[in-house]
Amino acid sequence: MGKYEKLIKRIFEGKLDITPDEAVNILNRLDFKSTSISGSHRTFRKPNRQSVTIIITQNPLKPYLMEKLQDILKQEGYHNE
């Protein structure tokens, strides 16, 4: 299992140690584009998908952002194994 797959597994397990950089890497890998930068906030968008705003200085991510990442991964065809 590669680093990317391990990260996805940690997100689905609800681990509360996911960093903003890891979240950004996942979103970039899923072809989300950074459309807005406002201070420490980065908004990522992809056509026909919900947008997500990552707070770069918030380490680790808050639980509500973890849930949003889980929803995005499910929309992209990943599932909790």
Image (cartoon, rainbow, N blue to C red):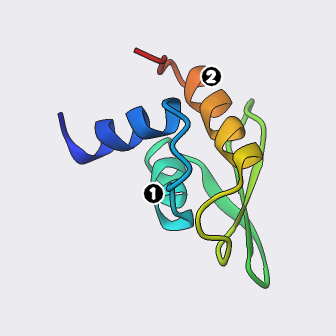
Query: Is 7 situated above or below 42?
Result: above
Q: Secondary structure at mark 1?
A: helix
Q: Position of residue 7 (x, y in %)?
A: 38, 44
How many marks can you see?
2
Q: Position of residue 28 (x, y in %)?
A: 49, 53
Q: Which residue is mark 1?
A: 25
The three-letter code of the residue at mark 2 reads Gln
Contact flag, marks 1 and 2 (Cβ < 8 Å): no
Q: Position of residue 79 (x, y in %)?
A: 48, 17
Q: Which residue is mark 2?
A: 75
Residue plotted at (55% across, 36% down): 14
Q: Position of residue 10 (x, y in %)?
A: 43, 39
Q: Residue furthest front?
A: 16
Residue plotted at (31% across, 36% down): 5
Crowd around label 2: few <14 · some 14–19 · many ≥20 (10 Å): few
Distance, label 1 to label 2, CA atoms, is 17 Å
Q: Secondary structure at mark 2?
A: helix
Query: Is 24 situated above or below 81?
Result: below
